[in-house]
Image: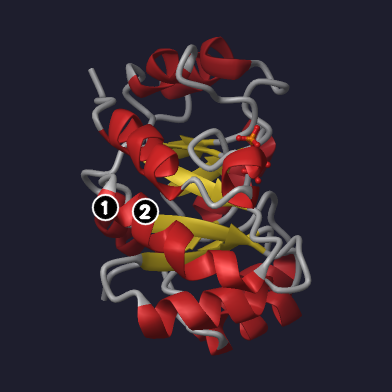
Amino acid sequence: MTTPSEQMIDLLAGQPVVPVLLVRRLEDAIPLARALARGGLPAIEVTLRTPVALDAIRLVSQEVPEAIVGAGTILSARDYGRAADAGSRFIVSPGTTPQLLAEARLGGLPFLPGAATPSEIMALQEEGYTAAKFFPAEQSGGAPYLKALASPLAQMRFCPTGGITPKNAESYLSLPNVICIGGSWVAPDALVGDGRWDEIEALAREASKLRRK
Ligand code: 3PG
């Protein structure tokens, strides 16, 4: 049986950037998911930070088959359950709690729990995880910090998120312990608010060309 980490790594294989989305209006969900998929970023993380997030996940999972919609900012077992019920194909959390790990064991979805320190990473490894969200990436020490973890904690691979932009993206993607990076820059609030889907598609296309070295 594959683990939640292996499932997560399979799902994100080949996609260097996962858009981290704040969907403020439900009517934006479908055109946003379609634009990102057209631009080459089908896997998207809809964060549970807006009142319409769960409905947005439900809508995209039903109406946009070319997208792989996951839920982010999952803070509790309850969040996990609601996101799974809405049709999330994967689950992302900024951190890790025992209750969330227990729910993830039951739920069985691809899961990317958050970790930012060696002790947090070791605790995840004890639970069988081999992939984590490194958050908040820039504020925690950025690519040099992650590079320093690669040798002592060689079994763990990361999707860093937080403060990543096209300018610093390659410093992360060049690291051996990075699977992909996450960020909101591909779907800026101003472009989503004005429905400028072609520009979002173009940002996604640029991001989809970033490659691990
Ligand atoms: C996240 O939830 O992963 C971050 O808030 C995204 O960070 P960014 O907005 O700095 O890309």
Query: Which of these two is toward me, 197 or 181?
Result: 197
Q: Looking at the picture, which amino acid does disc 1 mark?
A: Arg
Left or right of 170, for residue 152 = right
- Residue 162: horizontal and vertical position, in percent? 64, 32
- Looking at the image, is 209 positioned above or below residue 40? above
Residue 5 appears in the rendering: no
Q: What residue lies at 24% left-to-right and 29% top-to-bottom?
A: 209
Q: Are marks 1 and 2 in contact (CB under 8 Å)?
A: yes
Residue at 54 percent across and 75 percent down: it is: 57
Residue 74 in view of the camera: yes
Residue 31 appears in which quarter of the rendering? Answer: bottom left
- Does residue 97 appear left or right of residue 108 in this picture? right
Question: Is 93 drawn above or below residue 173 in the view shown?
Answer: below
Residue assigned mark 1: 38
Q: Position of residue 15 (x, y in %)?
A: 28, 44
* Residue corresponding to mark 2: 35
Q: Give whichever of 206, 128 is nearer the camera.
A: 206
Is residue 153 shown above or below 34? above
